Amino acid sequence: MELPTTMNAVEISSPGAPEVLKLTTRPLPELRSGEVLIRVAAAGINGPDLVQRRGGYPPPPGASDLPGLEIAGTVVAVSGESGAIRVGDAVCALVTGGGYAEYCAASASLCLPVPRGLSLEQAASLPETYFTVWSNVFDRGRLAAGETLLVQGGASGIGVAAIQTAAAFGNRVFATAGSAEKCQACEQLGAQQAINYRTEDFVEVVKRLTDNKGVDVILDMVAGDYIAREIKALAPDGRLVIIALLGGAKGNADFSAVMLKRLTVTGSTLRARSVEFKAAIAENLRTRIWPLIESGRIKPVIHARFALAEAARAHALMESGAHIGKLMLVLP
C-alpha cells in the first residue's frame, strides 16, 4: 500500500486554553529502528495532554510535539526489529506523543494486540490508563492480595481502570468522586464504597470502613492539601502513590505520622521512562490484564467520542470534570 506523504494532525499552536488546539497538516512520522507506523483509528485523551497544552508538560527529547499518548489502529510500516508485529496487524500502543494524528509512530515493544471482542476505539482507551495503573498500583504501590486500595478520582479514566483491576484481583477498593452519579458508577465498576468528596470526609469514611485501621494503598491524582489527610487515612506500612497534581504541587503534612506508621510516600510519571521500562509493563498487561479484558471482567468505559478536528471540545469537556471514564478522538 502506498502511503501519503502528509497527514492531518492536531497541534498545540501556543500554550493556553483548549482553543489553542489546531488542525494542521504534517509530514508522516519518520520511523526509528524498532518502531512501527500505525494508521490511527482512535486516540485517547488523558490528563497529561491537558497539562502539555497549558505548557506544563513538555515532551521528552526526541518525542513528537503533538499531544496524544495512546492509540489504536493498523500497522502500515515497520522499521528494523519489530518482533511478531507485521504490516496489517491491529494493535493498540502507548506512545510518547503524536497520537492526535492520522498516523503515529510507536515502539514495537509497546504495542499490544487488540483484545478479543473489542473495537479499535475501545482498545485505544486502554494503554495510557493501564500502563499507569499497573506501574503505580502494583509495581510502585505493591498492592498485595488481601489489601485495600483507595482511588482518588474514581470516575476518571485512570480511576475506572484502577477500580476494575484491583477488584478483579480480589482487593477491597474504595473510591472518591464528586457526585452521586459518579459514586454510583464507581460502585458498579467494583468499588465496595464510593465516597462523595463534596459531602463526605474520605478520612472518616475510610477509617470507619476499615475498623479504624486505614487503607494499605492510595492512588492519588490530587496531591496538594490531600496529602496530609491521606497520611491519616493510611494503615501502618501503607503506601501513598501520587500520579497527578490537580490540587497543587505543594502541601503541608505531619511527617511524624509517616515515621510512626512506617509509611511510603512516592510518585511517578511514565512518559519519559525508557522503552525497556515500559516494555516490562506491557508484558505484565499482556499476561495479567488482557485475559481479564477478554473475559469481560474488565471493560472499557468510554464517555464520549470526538472527531480529530474537535479536540478542543474534548479537552474542554475533560476540564469540566463532567465525564465518567474515557474521552476519545475517533478518525474515519
Image (spheres, rainbow, N blue to C red):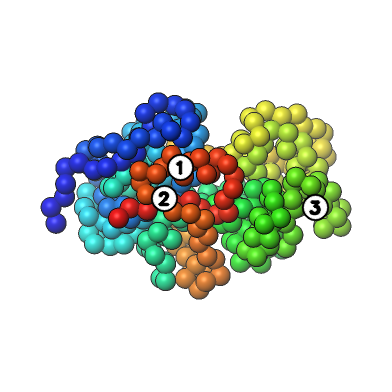
Label at residue 313 = 1
The residue that mark 3 highlights is 206
Viewer can see residue 63: no
The alpha-carbon separation of the residues under discs 1 and 2 comes to 8 Å
Label at residue 102 = none
- In the figure, residue 253 lies in which quadrant? top right
Dot 1 crowding, Cα within 10 Å, few <14, some 14–19, many 20+: some
Dot 1 and dot 2 residues touching (CB under 8 Å): yes
Q: Amino acid at mark 3?
A: Val
The alpha-carbon separation of the residues under discs 2 and 3 comes to 37 Å
Judge from the rendering whether residue 314 lies leftward or rightward of residue 62; answer left or right.
Answer: right
Residue in front for this viewpoint, 175 or 269: 175
Q: Is residue 225 above or below residue 282?
A: above
Q: Amino acid at mark 2?
A: Phe
Q: Choose the circle earlier in sequence order: 1 or 2.
A: 2
The residue that mark 2 highlights is 306
Which mark's residue is nearer the viewer, 3 or 1?
A: 1
Dot 2 crowding, Cα within 10 Å, few <14, some 14–19, many 20+: some
Residue at figure coordinates x 50%, y 34% from the top left: 51
Residue at figure coordinates x 74%, y 50% from the top left: 196
Viewer can see residue 37: yes
Residue at figure coordinates x 28%, y 47% from the top left: 103
Dot 3 crowding, Cα within 10 Å, few <14, some 14–19, many 20+: many
Dot 3 and dot 1 residues touching (CB under 8 Å): no
Which mark's residue is nearer the viewer, 2 or 3?
A: 2
Q: Secondary structure at mark 2?
A: strand
Q: Is residue 123 above or below residue 310?
A: below
In what quadrant of the picture does the C terminus appear? bottom left
Residue at figure coordinates x 69%, y 44% from the top left: 240
Dot 2 and dot 3 residues touching (CB under 8 Å): no
Q: Secondary structure at mark 1?
A: helix
In what quadrant of the picture does the N terminus appear? bottom left
